[in-house]
Image: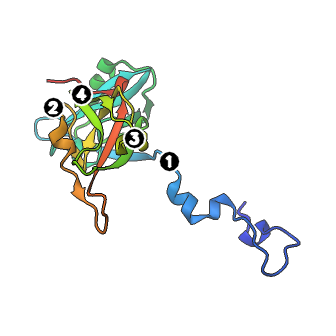
C-alpha cells in the first residue's frame, strides 16, 4: 500500500526545525543514483533476415558483442555491452554464444521480444584536458594501458586494463582508439578547464573482437 508522505514525517518536530530528508525524496540523490535500467525491446529483421547484432556468452550471461550501424538492432537502441536477459520469453542465462545466435536466426522476422539490461559493466566518465591538451591516459587497441598521476583521468577513477566503448557519443568498439580520438573533446560552456571528453568504458572481459 502507498504511504502518504505526511505519514513519513518525524513526529515531535517543532516549526523551523531542520529534518534530514528521506533519501528517496531527495532530488539530488535521485539524480546521483546509478540504476542500470531493464527494458523490453521489440526487434525485427531487415530484408535480408538480419538483426544486425552479435551476442556473446560472458560468465554465463548473454551480452551484445557488436551492433552494426543503421541495423534494426541499432534502431531499437541496442548497444555494445548490453546484457540480454530474455529472448521471446526464454531466460538466456547459461546459453552459449552459438545458442543465442541460433535463437535469433530462427525467430520471427516481424517481432523478437528482448528484455535488456543496459550495459551493467559500463561507467561513463567525463574527463577534462590539462593545459597541454591531454586527459592523462594512454590507449592501445581500445584498452587503457597507462594513467598519468594526478591527471583528470586518474582523479575521475579511470583504470588500466579497461576498454573504451565510446568517445563523446561515438562508438569506437573495434576501432584503433588512440590519443587523436580522446583529444577531440568538446569545449565546456563557461569552463576554463578546456575541453571535456565523455568516456563510457567497460571491463576487459566484456570487450569486442578486433578486426
Front residue of 118 and 12: 12
x and y, in percent, of residue 193 in the image: 31, 58
| Labels 1, 3: front one | 3
Mark-to-mark CA distance, 1 and 3 = 29 Å
Proximity of marks 4 and 1: CB atoms separated by less than 8 Å: no
As drawn, the label of residue 176 is 2
SS of the residue at dot 3? loop
CA gap, disc 4 to disc 1?
Answer: 31 Å
Residue bearing the label numbered 4: 105
Q: Residue at x 26, y 57 (%)?
A: 194
Q: CA distance from mark 2 to mark 4?
A: 30 Å
For the residue pair 200 and 35, the one nearer the viewer reads as 200
- Mark in the foreground, 1 or 2: 2
In the rendered image, the quadrant that contains the N terminus is: bottom right
Q: CA distance from mark 1 to mark 2?
A: 30 Å
Q: Under tag 2, what secondary structure?
A: loop
Q: Is residue 157 above or below residue 196?
A: above
Disc number placed over residue 131 in the picture, else none: none
Q: Earlier in the sequence, mark 4 or mark 1?
A: 1
Amino acid at each position: 500500500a502507498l504511504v502518504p508522505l505526511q505519514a513519513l514525517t518525524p513526529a515531535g518536530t517543532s516549526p523551523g526545525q531542520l529534518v534530514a530528508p528521506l533519501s528517496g525524496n531527495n532530488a539530488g540523490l535521485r539524480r546521483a543514483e546509478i540504476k542500470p535500467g531493464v527494458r523490453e525491446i521489440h526487434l525485427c529483421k531487415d530484408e535480408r533476415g538480419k538483426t544486425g547484432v552479435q551476442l556473446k556468452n560472458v560468465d554465463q550471461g548473454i551480452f551484445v558483442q557488436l551492433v552494426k550501424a543503421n541495423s534494426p538492432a541499432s534502431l531499437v537502441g541496442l548497444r555494445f555491452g548490453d546484457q540480454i536477459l530474455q529472448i521471446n520469453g526464454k531466460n538466456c542465462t547459461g546459453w552459449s554464444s552459438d545458442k543465442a545466435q541460433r535463437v535469433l536466426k530462427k525467430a520471427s522476422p516481424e517481432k523478437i521480444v528482448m528484455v535488456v539490461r543496459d550495459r551493467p559493466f559500463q561507467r561513463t566518465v567525463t574527463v577534462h584536458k590539462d593545459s597541454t591538451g591531454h586527459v592523462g591516459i594512454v590507449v592501445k587497441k581500445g584498452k587503457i594501458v597507462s594513467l598519468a598521476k594526478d591527471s583528470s583521468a586518474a582523479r575521475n577513477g579511470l583504470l588500466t586494463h579497461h576498454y573504451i566503448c565510446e568517445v563523446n557519443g561515438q562508438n569506437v568498439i573495434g576501432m584503433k582508439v588512440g590519443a587523436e580520438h580522446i583529444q577531440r573533446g568538446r569545449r565546456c560552456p563557461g569552463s576554463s578547464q578546456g575541453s571535456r571528453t565523455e568516456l563510457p568504458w567497460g571491463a576487459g572481459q566484456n570487450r569486442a573482437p578486433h578486426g
